[in-house]
Image: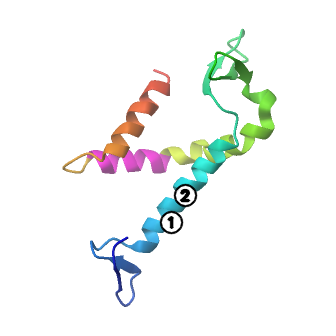
Amino acid sequence: MAECRVVPGVSRLDDGGVDVGQRDEVLGVAESLERLAAVSTPGDWRVGGLLATRPEVVAHLDGGGTEHVAEARAGSARWIAALSPALAGPLAAWLRSAAGEEEVDAAALSFARALRQRLPE
């Protein structure tokens, strides 16, 4: 890790001028998200069901099995709440910010591509 210096009235900055506190905050959130995913219902979640008026979210598991996410509430409720529609604004702002840079951040592009495959048309 790079050396840090303290600037009065500002958080600690590393040699590249990056706020160490902000970096640690972002890394902490990334780790929390991974921990939450690890205890949530696994698989590729897709909307399905027999009735259009009562769609179901079904987790398609490795090995070909499926599990209704609603039936696995204990493993999925915290994930659903954590990734609620309240995150759409900040995520869209991040993607717009990344798109406005001279070189698009690879992580933002990867996220956008993965999300595009999951969004309804």
Asked where in the image residue 29 lies, by quadrant, the reply is: bottom right
Left or right side of 85 for 100: left
Q: Inspect the magenta stretch and tell me whether residue 1 lies in it.
A: no
- Residue type of the residue flagged with mark 1: Glu
- Horizontal and vertical percent for residue 50? 72, 8
Tell me which residue sits at (67%, 40%) in the image.
Answer: 80
Q: As rendered, which of 74 and 84 lies closer to the eye?
A: 74
Quadrant occupied by the C terminus? top left
Q: Residue furthest bottom?
A: 8
Residue stretch rendered in magenta on the structure: 89-99
Left or right side of 99 for 34: right
- Horizontal and vertical percent for residue 19? 38, 73
- Horizontal and vertical percent for residue 48? 65, 16
Tell me which residue sits at (58%, 50%) in the image.
Answer: 33
Q: Residue furthest top?
A: 50
Main SS of residues in magenta: helix
Asked where in the image residue 108 lies, by quadrant, the reply is: top left
Q: Residues within 10 Å of mark 1 (few under 14, many from 20)?
A: few
Q: Residues within 10 Å of mark 2 (few under 14, many from 20)?
A: few
Q: Secondary structure at mark 2?
A: helix
Residue, disc 1: 25
Q: As rendered, which of 103 and 91 lies closer to the eye?
A: 103
Tell me which residue sits at (49%, 60%) in the image.
Answer: 27
Residue, disc 2: 29
